[in-house]
Amino acid sequence: MEQHVELSLRYDVCFVDRVFESTRDVLINAVAAPGSGRRPKVLLCVDDGLARANPHVVPAAQAYLRRFSSRCQLVSPAPLTIPGGEAAKQGFTAIEPILRAVYERGLDRHDSVIAVGGGAVLDAVGFAAAVAHRGVRLVRVPTTVLSQNDAGVGVKNAINLYGSKNFVGTFATPTAVLVDTTLLHTLAVRDQRAGMAEAVKVAAIRDAEFFLWLEAQADSLRAFEPAAVARSIRDAAHLHLAHIRQSGDPFERGSARPLDFGHWAAHKLESMTDHELRHGEAVAIGMCIDTAYAVAVGHAPQHVAQRLVRLLERLGLPTGHPALARRGEDGRLTVLDGLEEFRQHLGGELSITLLSEVGVQVQVHAIDTTVMAQICEERADGCRAR
């Protein structure tokens, strides 16, 4: 006997200003559905970097949840603070405090973990929530450009292990994602700009008109003007979500990963620099490498690479890094090991996304490593903008 099982999954992504204001009900409705009659427990997890940079966030979040105490139970008077950046997801020891809090506070599968922070914190908390009881409800409140336009709105979470980025993780839909761009104002300039790489990425592979808009607004985006930033985040998030909805492969069972354009080199560079490079910065460099390769092997005209590099530079993003010239004991460029690591991460055959034109992608399944090595060496001398 053979049966076909088809699953339907849904989660809400809401764009809301001042999410912790007492007049806003979107967060409490994500935690406790109106009229449900249940008073679920809530574990609040907050990015430590955010809490220090914006000391008003934690009191505002706590006051909000206490205001709705008739509908939810805040399980601790103080939030669980998570180290910001990649430290949040360095191995199982990083998530043990989250799992312990879920266990000791008695949360079950119908209770909620609220994760407030950047992409790495959302990854770590999301992974812990996904494996505790095989899945505790998760509400994400992303607080960086990159987490609002990319990492925080998708269905993936992971931690790093054995020096490999995102080696252990799950696909798990959150209950809701609440995007509040008013939480971005305390970001360091470097982090403001780094997150814009993911907007460039999704425009480059999916939407030539959005790419044109980014080019036209590059000066405003670099200056972090609120209206331009909010629109770039909204449009990039919509494109990422459209891919998840329409690709037919939301959990990446196949080998093609167009949303990972530029990421094979990016992930390797992050580990090679001990995460001194921000993820967005590494993605910017990775896109430059892969687009230069596309030109070199005849997949794309030169102007595609020129437009991409120029846009990234105008946004204040790096287009090269000295680590690209690093060699192992065998004399081979270390960054090229990222190709096989990426293939293993994909599963099956290697599949690298290249551009054939702005807004048009092509998948290739083999890389000429001699050509790629030459490009990486050229990019090792690239300008590292800020």
Image (cartoon, rainbow, N blue to C red):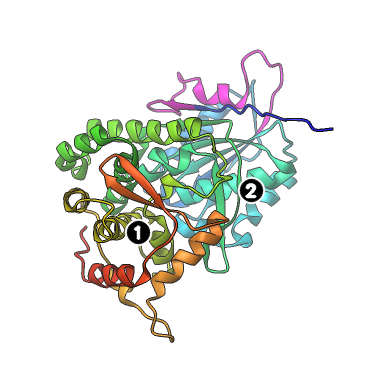
Q: Is 202 displayed left or right of 345 in the figure?
A: left
Toward the top, the furthest residue is 35
Query: Foreground: 203 or 217?
Result: 203
The reply to whether residue 147 is in sight is yes
Label 2 amino acid? Ala
Residue closest to the eye, 70 or 353: 353
Structural distance between the alpha carbons of marks 1 and 2: 26 Å
In the rendering, which numbered label is found on residue 128? 2
> How far across and down, in percent of the image, does residue 357 sit?
25, 44
Above or below residue 120? Residue 41 is above
Q: Secondary structure at mark 1?
A: helix
Whole-percent x and y of residue 237?
39, 34
With respect to residue 40, does 350 lie above or below?
A: below
The reply to whether residue 275 is in sight is: no
Bounds of the magenta segment = 13-41
Q: Is residue 342 magenta?
A: no
Q: Which residue is mark 1?
A: 282
Label 1 CA crowd tier, 10 Å (few <14, some 14–19, many 20+)? many
124, above or below 112, in the image: below
Residue drawn at x 64%, y 26% is: 72
Could you tell me residue 232's position as x and y percent?
29, 35
Magenta span: chief secondary structure: loop
Of residue 310 and residue 69, the one placed in the foreground of this image is: 310
Residue 9 is situated, as x and y percent measured from the top left of the image, at 61, 28
